Image: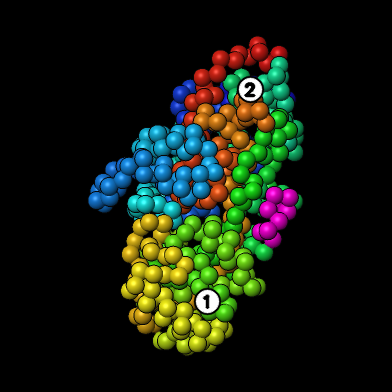
Amino acid sequence: MKAVVDMVIIGAGMAGLCASVEAAAAGANVIVLEKQPNIGGSSLLSGCFMAFAGTELQEKLGITDSVESLIQDMLHVGQYKNDRALIETYGHHQLDTYNWLVEQGVQFKDCQAVSGHTNPRGHTITPHQAMDILKKRAIEHGATIYTDALVTRLEKINERVARVYVTYEGHSFVVEARKGIIITSGGFSRSEELLEQFAPGLTNTIRLGGAGNIGDGIRLACDQGAWLRDTPYLKGTYGFHPSSTNDNKRQAHTFYKGGIIVNEQGDRFVNESISYKLLGDAALQQSNQCTFQIWDQTVMDKGVKGDALYDFASLYEIGLIEQAESIEALAMIIGVPPISLQQTVSDYNNAIDTSNDKLGRTTLSHTFGNLTKIRTAPFYAMRTSTAMLATYAGVTVNEKAEVLNPYSESIPGLFAAGEVVGGFHGAGYMTGSSLGKAAIFGRIAAKQVIQQSYTEEALV
């Protein structure tokens, strides 16, 4: 059986759903193919932040921000290894996309200081609410969304990628796209084969991420001549309790509220204000990959109930956080040398007075926030690991979301957005930029496909 439509979108996470709403609202005949039983993918497992600058929410909270600051932060965190054209495109489209999401009904609850940002610009969503409302809008505009629909191969017609082979309900189908195909299928955090090939140094990480994130979208694109970017910069995500699973992402970032990180010797080994991707690298270099977050009641009081990264109280209630009335007692509970941990905390507190931290820490997160001493009992600790949550490397695209070959030439008919794309994050990751880029470039890809002038006759 064969169907002919304007556009095929492969994957129904943030990028795919934003693309489907944008395209269907413009009158395009759109089919979305999601191989999992439900929509959402790894977007549902995200930390719930989206990075935007100059929003109405920031203004209400008294936060002054700018596009230029956002762009510079992204380039700095990415160590200038990211594609400037992609970053600038993000900056120039981000406010419009924020307002568009609000118009669709996506609810932004708060705006917080998060990793890598000069200003508080982590706009928090409830991922399930966002996915559900975007799905609803797509269907209202006429898009058709299939779940349990596995795309097995793409094929060119007259030098343009236009044919999609899909298995659905036990049958094989062919869908031909008059205007274009958008791959929004996520990364490969659940593919041991690809992780071993591209990131063998991440063997000792907790395996999280969307169950469908096995890199099949990348394979589909590469089969059509796509080039890959950023695989040398693959990193894990620091902040997870070792017992974490996809269903229970037990994550805390107390270090961005004033806590410190120590190894099993009780020593600090990293500037806690840097990106949690870089923290993950440093943690994996410690003996037995064993590390702990250490903090006091001052930091505990900064927790945010229900927040994916800062709900410290809930982790304490289920027994994942240890508490003691002294640093010595806390050290004995977690099994690190008490004298060492006491000295570490003392040195850290003294360094705040002298502005001379041995690891170079001067802020809470990136360039934001003032350090506080760890001195108010009770004291807390959580054993913490690095997880492979998302891959942030993949096919090469330009600022139009067109997939490129090894010679930086666009592959006719093929577009990509979201985690499947490389080149955006470079050597570091800034919180909120993953969901942000998925929404922004999902919309850009849809607009570009709509503009294509191919006709049904060209498919023959």
323 or 411, nearer to the observer: 411
Mark 1 to mark 2: distance in Å?
A: 54 Å
Give me the residue at 60% from left, 73% from top: 290
Residue 250 at what x, y percent from top left?
53, 65
Q: Is residue 196 magenta?
A: yes
Disc sitting over residue 267 in the figure: 1
Q: Residue tagged by mark 2?
A: 412
Q: Is residue 38 visible?
A: no
Q: Is disc 1 placed on a helix, strand or loop?
A: loop
Q: Quadrant of the N terminus?
A: top right
Q: Residues within 10 Å of mark 2 (few under 14, many from 20)?
A: many
159 or 140, nearer to the observer: 159
Q: The disc labelled 1 sits on which kind of residue?
A: Asp
Q: Quadrant of residue 365?
A: bottom left
Q: Is residue 55 above or below residue 180?
A: below
Q: Is residue 253 above or below residue 148?
A: below
- What span is colored magenta in the figure? 195-203
Q: Quadrant of residue 70?
A: top left
Q: Is residue 39 above or below residue 204?
A: above
Residue 367 at what x, y percent from top left?
38, 56
Q: Choose the circle earlier in sequence order: 1 or 2.
A: 1
Q: The disc labelled 2 sits on which kind of residue?
A: Pro
Give me the residue at 51% from left, 44% from top: 80
Give me the residue at 52% from left, 28% from top: 400
